[in-house]
Image (cartoon, helix red, strand yellow):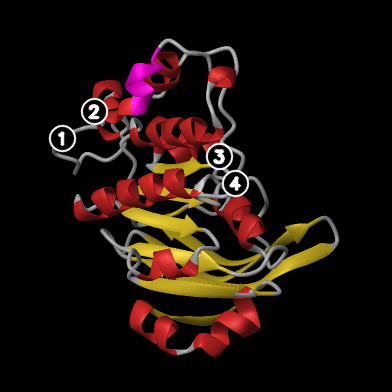
Amino acid sequence: MMLELQAVQSGYGPSQVLFGVDLRIEAGQVVTLLGRNGMGKTTLLRTLFGQLPLRGGSMRFAGQDIAGWEPDRIARAGMAIVPEGRQCFPNLTVREHLTAFVARRNPAIETPWTPERVFTLFPRLGERAGNMGNQLSGGEQQMLAIGRALVTNPRLLILDEATEGLAPRIREEIWACLAQLRAAGQTILVIDKYVERLLGLADRHIILERGKAVWSGDSAALDADRTLWEQYLGV
């Protein structure tokens, strides 16, 4: 089991946001975390990465209990995130972004991700290798954020709002990238609102509602029950 969260509780100060969330991801799976804004998805990620304290439950990653770990230790264990808003450095070039984060955190990867391999995945980044982070379009910044996570060679890749704010053509490029990563065996957790596209990409889906996991199942089950979309996803 790559990631196993059981009865996770968390929140901010006196406010509790998560009320016993369960989530399991096996190695090589693509799993989505769905739900409207404000339902606890970001809080769950912050708790997972050690940015918020775990108030109850357990978190295991790659066989280790990670409750109480600092964010840098969790990252070194092989968890990488493509954050909402991309958070590219304005004063680093594309190549510097990729070079600075090179690591080998998943020894099972036979062909490690390098800056040059990222340029093969996203040729547009190769064309802009000398451009600063603030000289890129939103789509290019998202590609860079994905590449920056990939060069750490993670065990688990997490994308928070994978295609938010991107033009349709760029969204398709991101989906194609994720399909390639899945085919290569990369374990992925995706947060995004484009359910139709996620159906063909993911093995399993979890829906959060007010800090609780109210539904989980495979793509066939989610596709078959459109009342879930209306009730919990606003689609």
**Is tag 1's residue or tag 3's residue first in the polypeptide sequence?**
3
> In the rendered image, is residue 103 in sight?
no
Q: Residue at x 49, y 73 (%)?
A: 206
**Is tag 2's residue or tag 4's residue first in the polypeptide sequence?**
2
Give the residue at mark 2.
117
The range drawn in magenta is 124-129
Is residue 79 positioned above or below 16 on the image?
Answer: above
Chief secondary structure of the magenta portion: helix
> In the rendered image, is residue 30 in sight?
yes
Give the residue at mark 4.
165
Cα distance, mark 3 to mark 4?
Answer: 27 Å
Q: Is residue 181 left or right of residue 233?
A: left
Residue 207: x %, y % from top left = 55, 75
Cα distance, mark 1 to mark 3?
Answer: 26 Å
Tell us which disc is closer to us: 3 or 4. 4
Contact (Cβ within 8 Å) of mark 2 with mark 4: no
Q: Is residue 224 left or right of residue 15?
A: left
Helix, strand or loop at label 3? It is helix
Give the residue at mark 3.
71
Cα distance, mark 2 to mark 4?
Answer: 26 Å
Helix, strand or loop at label 1? It is loop
Cα distance, mark 4 to mark 1?
Answer: 32 Å
Tell us which disc is closer to us: 2 or 3. 2
Give the amino acid type for the residue marked by disc 2 in the picture.
Arg
Contact (Cβ within 8 Å) of mark 2 with mark 1: yes
Give the residue at mark 1.
111
Is residue 182 positioned above or below 33 on the image?
Answer: above
Tell us which disc is closer to us: 1 or 3. 1
Tell us which disc is closer to us: 4 or 1. 4
Give the amino acid type for the residue marked by disc 1 in the picture.
Thr
